[in-house]
Image (cartoon, rainbow, N blue to C red):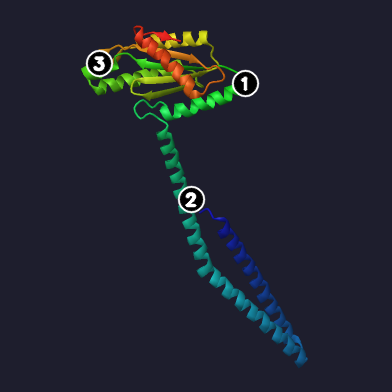
Amino acid sequence: MRLHKSEAAFFVFVAVILAAGIVIFHAYDLLFSIAKGLGQSGRFDDIVYVSKLLFGAGLLLATGLFFGLFFIFPLIRRQVKEENKLRAMTETLSVHSRNLERAALTDGLTGMQNRRYFDEALKEYLDEFRRVDKPVGLMIVDLDHFKQINDTHGHDVGDEVLKAVGNCLRDMTRYHDVVARLGGEEFAVVAPNMEMETMMRFAERIRKAIGGMAIVSGNVRLKVTASVGIAIWDRKETADALYRRADQQLYQAKNTGRNRVCA
């Protein structure tokens, strides 16, 4: 059984009392033996008196030991148990709080980061990369004719499509890119340290990867395409302004035939 610090300290206290008691009773026995061998009655009376004092001190120590073992220690033990329960409860609440926080930043369907996480991460990336004067690319990906998929095959199939696209985006991006589902059939990728030419090639690979997937759900097998809008941060604009520019390019891709990248 592992002892709490207060319990260990209590047992040290008990050990000291026991040691003191042993010494006192030894002194009492020694004095009493000496007293028997003395001939002077006055001296004998003094030694007997001291021995009685020692005996009384020993009784007090024994009382303290009894009180400590049967009253103080149970109180300490109860306090330790309550403290352990509180600590366990606190740890459980902390884990629960972290899970709730993670859930608040995660899309429940795809397991990707959600819009709230995306908004916060984009602002933080711009703040950090402003210090080092490096570019940040933003890509908004929107699935083409997704409503028709839901209307024709049902929302269950639509959910499978969204999960497949989310997995594709995670596989295609780098570990430090931010990949999020913004809502509905719209996704976003924040790609730091990418200039326009590199970002265009990156977006084209993602567009082709999405278009090349064969999504199977039950007896339904289908393909989807995506339109992509791109904007590169100009080192001055806010996160909202950068998002609006990428969103404008997405609408441009939609209006010019879909299944394409506009920047």
Amino acid type, residue under disc 1 in the picture: Val
Q: Which residue is mark 1?
A: 132
Amino acid type, residue under disc 2 in the picture: Arg
Whole-number angstrom distance, CA of label 1 to CA of label 3: 45 Å
Is residue 167 positioned above or below 33 on the image?
above
Q: Nearer the viewer, residue 208 or 11?
A: 208
Indicate the position of residue 262 as horizontal and vertical percent values. 43, 9
Tell us which disc is closer to us: 2 or 3: 3
Indicate the position of residue 122 as horizontal and vertical percent values. 49, 25
Name which quarter of the figure residue 45 lies in.
Answer: bottom right
Q: Is residue 195 left or right of residue 43?
A: left
| Marks 2,3: beta carbons within 8 A | no
Q: Which residue is mark 2?
A: 87
Q: Earlier in the sequence, mark 1 or mark 3?
A: 1
* Label 2 CA crowd tier, 10 Å (few <14, some 14–19, many 20+): few
| Marks 2,1: beta carbons within 8 A | no
* Label 3 CA crowd tier, 10 Å (few <14, some 14–19, many 20+): few
Is residue 141 positioned above or below 98 on the image?
above
Amino acid type, residue under disc 3 in the picture: Gln
| Marks 1,3: beta carbons within 8 A | no
Q: Nearer the viewer, residue 39 or 250?
A: 250
Q: Nearer the viewer, residue 57 or 44?
A: 57
Residue 148 shows which numbered tag?
Answer: 3
Looking at the image, the residue that sits furthest to the bottom is 41
Is residue 111 positioned above or below 209 on the image?
below
